[in-house]
Image (cartoon, rainbow, N blue to C red):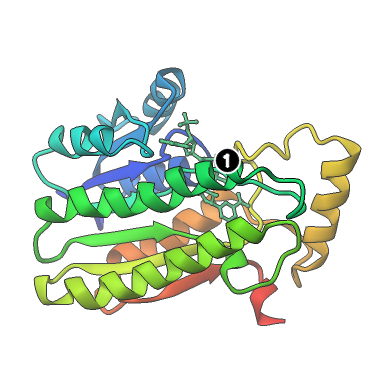
Amino acid sequence: MGALDGRLAVITGGGTGIGLAIAERYANEGAEVVIAGRRKGRLDEAISRIGHGARGVVTDVGDEAQVQRLMDSVPRVDLLVTCAGGAVFGAVETVPMSAWQGLFKDRFFGQLSACRHAVPKMSAGGVIVLCSGIAGHAALANYAGGAALCGGINAMGRSLAIELAPKGIRVNVLSPGLTRDTAIDWGTPTAETRALLDTLVNHVPMKRPGVPRDMADAAFFLATCAYANGMVLDVDGGWTAV
Ligand SMILES: NC(=O)c1ccc[n+]([C@@H]2O[C@H](COP(=O)([O-])OP(=O)(O)OC[C@H]3O[C@@H](n4cnc5c(N)ncnc54)[C@H](OP(=O)(O)O)[C@@H]3O)[C@@H](O)[C@H]2O)c1
């Protein structure tokens, strides 16, 4: 018996990194998992890794019609996890506005539209896990737009938690700290990204980045703890405790 037996989970960004680790965890706990992302090849690789009958739906979450199609493809939504989206780093005077706008289109409006189209398919006992990042309240240079986005998602999660509580739907925000082994490509770092990574790791009292599995543990807690609602859960090795 798994803790998520009989639950249908839709996980955007489930083809890689944090979303994939969450999909694996939920599937191992008995959930029927549907993952969404833009690259079919990544989704195909991911669903064979997840197993348990997982399936993928090619979706660009920045396009509301595609989000609607994703939700139309499932009979109901018990668990919604919104990990899709990337990151943009750079000095405020150098990053073009189009880059920040793209980030918000996918990662802010993508999460909002996922909620908009999933909520009608959810019933009492449903759970939404949004994804922000600790930059929402830990000041980080060269990330002005991303920090604003994370803070906005945290606020969105609290507002939705109040709004949806009467329907019996819980809403929380997973706020990852620095997490490696994801497609945010720290993988083969240049000297510059290596230096950035070292600087970031130095902020962490545990002196190491997290891994997607750490985030999956937190997402499992948010899926199963019946009294967790309106939370922003920082999973960051203690970064924001300092
Ligand atoms: N890693 C960290 O240190 C960290 C820290 C704080 C917050 N976060 C946030 O946590 C989330 C997951 O991060 P991650 O590290 O796991 O990154 P990741 O491996 O790059 O995963 C992001 C996923 O989102 C999908 N995606 C991106 N844009 C999309 C779009 N428009 N429509 C549909 N899918 C889209 C990507 O697949 P396709 O490219 O195939 O679409 C990819 O599978 C992201 O929102 C990230 O910003 C990460």
Location of the C terminus by quadrant is bottom right
Location of residue 17 with respect to 53 vertically, above or below: below
Residue 57, image x and y in percent? 29, 28
Q: Nearer the viewer, residue 72 or 198?
A: 72
Residue 117, image x and y in percent? 19, 48
Could you tell me the amino acid type at mark 1?
Ser
| Mark 1 crowdedness (10 Å alpha carbons): few <14, some 14-19, many ≥20 | few
Q: Nearer the viewer, residue 212 or 92?
A: 92
Element type where label 1 sits in the image: helix
Left or right side of 63 for 75 = left
Q: Nearer the viewer, residue 82 or 55?
A: 82
Residue at the location (13% across, 36% down)? 72
Residue at the location (11% across, 46% down)? 76
Residue at the location (82% across, 51% down)? 196
Residue 38, image x and y in percent? 41, 27
Extreme top residue here?
41
Residue at disc 1, CB closer than 8 Å to ligand 1: no
Residue 241, image x and y in percent? 66, 81
Task: Kindly identify which residue carries mark 1.
Answer: 98
Left or right side of 32 for 27 = right
